[in-house]
Amino acid sequence: QVQLVESGGGLVQAGGSLRLSCAASGSISSRDIMGWYRQAPRNQRELVASISSSGISFYSNSVKGRFTISRDSAANTVFLQMSSLRPEDTSVYYCAAGIINPTRARYWGQGTQVTVSS
């Protein structure tokens, strides 16, 4: 059974930073693409950033230049360093593993709330 456990969410003022972590356990392949999605109320879930086992990363236009994704493949852990946070970044952030395309992943975490106050 696969488990993804996120940590690091919280409340921060605009312009501040947060670092999200996600530890995967179970039948996760180190070759799986891992990443982070977010979903705000009344919005669709969107892919924020992803990273392959070789370190190739993708960022949505809305976070490019502000967020940095990294991973420790040996530990099946992925991180999201978020800087210059804006109120519109407020969402529930979900860790995902085995990302197939921008809307599909095999495994999901339970989500962690990030709230950015203005």
Image (tube, rainbow, N blue to C red):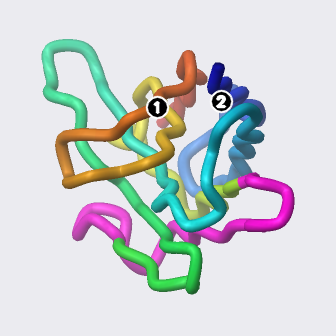
Q: Earlier in the sequence, mark 2 or mark 1?
A: 2
How packed is label 1: few (under 14 Cα within 10 Å), some, or many (20 or more)?
some
Task: Answer whether labels 2 and 1 touch (C-beta < 8 Å).
Answer: yes
On residue 107, the disc is 1
Q: In the image, is 6 to the left or to the right of 111?
A: right
Q: Which residues are magenta?
A: 59-77
- Residue shown at the point (56%, 25%) measured from the top left: 109
Picture quarter with the N terminus = top right
Q: Which residue is mark 2?
A: 4
- Which residue is painted at 44% across and 78% down in the image? 57
> Mark 2 Cα within 10 Å, few/some/many (few <14, many 20+)?
many
- Residue 83 screen position, x and y as percent: 60, 63
Give whichever of 64, 110 is nearer the camera: 110
Amino acid beneath label 2: Leu
Pinpoint residue 67: horizontal percent, then vertical percent: 52, 67
Judge whether 86 appears above or below 70 on screen.
above
